[in-house]
Image (spheres, rainbow, N blue to C red):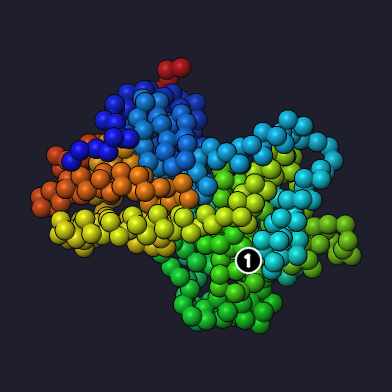
Amino acid sequence: MTLPPDLPPHHGFARSNALQRRLHELVPGGAHTYARGADQYPEQMAPILVRGNGCRVWDADGNQYVEYGMGLRSVTLGHACAPVLDAVTTTIADGVNFSRPTELELLAAEDFLDLVPGADMVKFAKNGSDATTAAVRLARAVSGRQRIAVCEQPFFSVDDWFIATTPMSAGIPAQVGAETVRFPYNDVDALAAVLAGDTVAAVVMEPATATAEPEPGYLQAVRALCDRHGTLLVFDEMITGFRWAAGGAQSVYGVTPDLSCWGKAMGNGFPISALAGRREYLERGGLRTDADRVFLLSTTHGPETSGLAAFRAVAAAYRTGDPIARMEAAGAALATGFTALVTELGIGDHLRVRGRSSCLIFETLDSHGNPCQAFRTLFLQELLQRGVLGQSFVTSAAHDHDAIAATLSACAAAAQVYRTALERGTVDGLLRGRSVAPAIRRTAAPRQIETSTSR
């Protein structure tokens, strides 16, 4: 299949691989986020990026890609979005970090609370984990309880209270994990059982995910259970915020949490996060309380001006335009075209996309119909060689018609190779190197690399 003119032939990964080897010498894991690690991509095929614009990125070898995932869902307006960059550039020309609050902090708080009317107060930070951990600490202080109930959803924090429940719990005392319990999504009875006995300080959950919408009445039932048991309801809006709606999933489903945690797309890639919620709780971290104060969020870089300026520009873009409609339209077109091409090839039961149109994932099943990392790796490998980069098909408002057409062209060719593997019943002879591995796992195997002492 002929590549579209805006996606030139691939030049290989020689320089990217050399840079990746050097990164492994200097940075544990070779990346600063596990989800960005080389083990999440086909072996020796993990591009090191040098720039981006819109929905396209370029690597150190001069290859161009249509990118999906967009900074782990942190970029919804597109890379190098001019209004955001202009706002940041203008603002930082007057300084970045000061020893007292700036008016910008007030203006950003007003913008945020205008978008999230269910919240009374907000405090800014730099990453989502800080916000969720602050919510947990606050809930424990308010309730006088220790246990935290988390929904069986992928990720909430890098901090001990959550990581202790994952396979990468080394270095965390066992008793820490014992204070965090899990419950399944869309199961009211299961949550009721967890809350029985009134020992849970907070329920922490995403109100929805890419592949799971709340059943009718579910979130309302969760809200009622929390109220009945004196438990704070915390919504993680890291992904749903600015992707489901500017006001988050809580505005879509009409359920207001006690606290909510935000990040990712609120700065279009610039580092900023937020903890928001009811005044009576957040004041416990302030100066207008008679209760013992909670060390809520106190960060050197939380109020620095570039992140706040980026957020205000994002908020303006959502008020004056409709980026969510654009990213959803792009995802819908991609899903429709993808389904048509795999159906035509007769492999629609083995290679498919699903999820919310702005947050699509692809499923890769082997010849027996079972989810398979080796087949997933083969699909990623074939997409990379054809100018598509992504562990999912998560779109942005910058994914235009040409990008979707180029992606479908690449998918059509990749699907042909995938069908060959299905017919053989194996990826042997087609897959180069080892399969990708879960980002959070107990050991470096099955993608452990040899130790080098070269500097």
The secondary structure type at the circle numbered 1 is strand
Residue drawn at the location 52% of the way across and 47% of the way down: 77
Residue 200 falls in image quadrant: bottom right
- Would you place residue 90 above or below residue 142 in this image? above
Q: For the N terminus, which image quadrant?
A: top left
Residue drawn at the location 14% of the way across and 39% of the way down: 429
Q: Is residue 380 left or right of residue 115?
A: left
> Residue extending furthest top?
455
Q: Is residue 145 left or right of residue 455?
A: right
Residue drawn at the location 45% of the way across and 70% of the way down: 213
Q: Is residue 372 left or right of residue 445?
A: left
Give the x, y percent position of residue 391.
37, 47
Visible in this render: residue 301?
no
Number of on-image labels: 1
Q: Amino acid at mark 1?
A: Val
- Would you place residue 279 above or below residue 64 in this image? below
In depth, the one of 179 and 18 nearer the eye is 18
Q: Is residue 200 left or right of residue 413?
A: right
In depth, the one of 415 and 55 nearer the eye is 55
- Would you place residue 5 above or below residue 179 in this image? above
> Residue extending furthest left?
424
Residue 269 falls in image quadrant: top right
In depth, the one of 60 and 377 nearer the eye is 60
Residue drawn at the location 64% of the way across and 72% of the way down: 256
For disc 1, the marked residue is: 234
Residue 164 falls in image quadrant: bottom right
Give the x, y percent position of residue 128.
60, 51
